Image (spheres, rainbow, N blue to C red):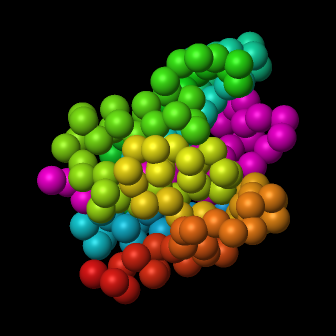
Amino acid sequence: MSKFILLDRDGVINQESHDFIKSPDEWQPLAGSLEAIALLNQHGYQVAVITNQSGLARGMFTEADLAQIHAKMQRMAIEHGGNISAIYYCPHGPGSTCECRKPKPGLLLQCATEHQIDLSATWMVGDSYRDLQAGIAAGAQPVLVKTGNGLKTLTEHPNLNCLIFDTLYDATQYLISRQ
């Protein structure tokens, strides 16, 4: 079994934008997030990104644009000594009945199957309630970070039963301290 940590993208690794991240120039990492990915790798974890990208369905950017955004994310992770092993995204809009759009667990289950991951021993780190719901539905351990939409999520759901950290880097330090 591979050791993975599953990360939402917008608001966890990079700055959240209510106008959507539509180009590589708009993709800006959060302080410490790329260092966190490197630290996870150094401690034997592979990183997979699990992200809803409804901007595709809305016609706000293309698959080629998204590929360029993800290439920048991967390149910057490498520049910081880290590696993102896999990226899974849902291209559908909020009204879709697909199984891949979080809060549904489809992308997490696909990742687990393709990489032989024990989801019960895997963290799903997100900044929104739907990230946590997807993690729970897939049998993973939900973790909330207060970056991106995290503070709003915490305000709207004050009784969350999960680990909560200020940033991905803080979550990473906790995880590796428990090894």
Residue 144 position by quadrant: bottom right
Q: Does residue 105 show up magenta in the picture?
A: no
Image side of residue 111 versus residue 105, left or right? left
Q: Is residue 56 visible?
A: no
Residue 152 position by quadrant: bottom right
Q: Residue at x 59, y 17 (%)?
A: 97
Q: Residue at x 39, y 72 (%)?
A: 39
Instruction: Indicate the position of residue 5 as horizontal and vertical percent values.
Output: 38, 57
Instruction: Indicate the position of residue 175 as horizontal and vertical percent values.
Output: 40, 76
Image side of residue 103 versus residue 159, left or right? left
Instruction: Indicate the position of residue 166 as horizontal and vertical percent values.
Output: 66, 75
How many marks do you count on the picture? Answer: 0
- Please tell me which residue lies in front, 7 or 140: 140
> From which residue to which does the magenta span run?
1-29
- Please tell me which residue lies in front, 33 or 170: 170
Q: Residue furthest bottom?
A: 177
